Image: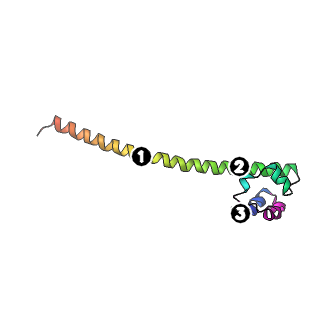
Amino acid sequence: MDVVAWLRGLGLEQYAPAFRDNDVDAQVLPSLTADDLISIGVKSVGHRRKLLDAIAALGADVSSATTMAVSRDVLAPVDAERRQLTVMFCDLICDVARVSNPT
């Protein structure tokens, strides 16, 4: 993720040099605190609040993406179990048909 573009999207591009000078990248961004923002020069409480809310939203997006990936991994074994159950059911039907119709 491009931090400068992210700041521009928030209407806070004036902080791009401060973020760049303090090596704030996509990896560091989610762990920023209000104190960190103050120390890099974000003086406005409103701007800090906006940034912290946007950072929290980034964390929620990552979290939901991770949850979706985990969900897909968890569902894979269920599909395999269904397949085995279907095969077992077909075998059972064939056996019942043979017993019912001994030719």
Please tell me whether residue 99 belongs to the stretch shown in magenta.
Answer: no
Q: Residues within 10 Å of mark 2 (few under 14, many from 20)?
A: few
Give amino acid for label 1.
Asp
Report, in whole angstroms, how far the alpha carbon at label 2 lies from the one at label 3: 16 Å
Q: The disc labelled 3 sits on which kind of residue?
A: Asp
In this picture, is 92 found above or below 59? above
Which quadrant of the figure has residue 15?
bottom right
The image position of residue 39, as x and y in percent, is 85, 55
Residue with the mark numbered 3:
2
- Give the position of the N terminus as an image quadrant: bottom right
- Real-space Cα distance between discs 1 and 3? 38 Å
Circle count: 3
Q: Are marks 2 and 3 in contact (CB under 8 Å)?
A: no
Left or right of 51, for residue 43: right
Furthest-right residue in this view: 43
Residues 50 and 24: in front is 24
Q: Where's the C terminus, which quadrant?
A: top left
**First of labels 1, 3 by sequence position:** 3
Mark carried by residue 57: 2
Give the residues drawn in magenta, as a range: 11-27
Would you say the residues marked 1 and 2 are in contact, meaning their CB atoms lie under 8 Å apart?
no
Q: Nearer the viewer, residue 68 or 36?
A: 36
Q: Would you place residue 92 above or below residue 5 in this image?
A: above
On the image, numbered disc 1 is attached to which residue? 79
Label 1 residue SS: helix
Q: Residue furthest left?
A: 103
Mark closer to the chain start, 1 or 2: 2
Using residue 86 as the reference point, say whether residue 23 is left or right of it: right
Q: Amino acid at mark 2?
A: Ala
Q: Residues within 10 Å of mark 1 (few under 14, many from 20)?
A: few
Q: How many C-alpha atoms fall within 10 Å of the one at disc 3: few (<14), some, or many (≥20)?
A: few
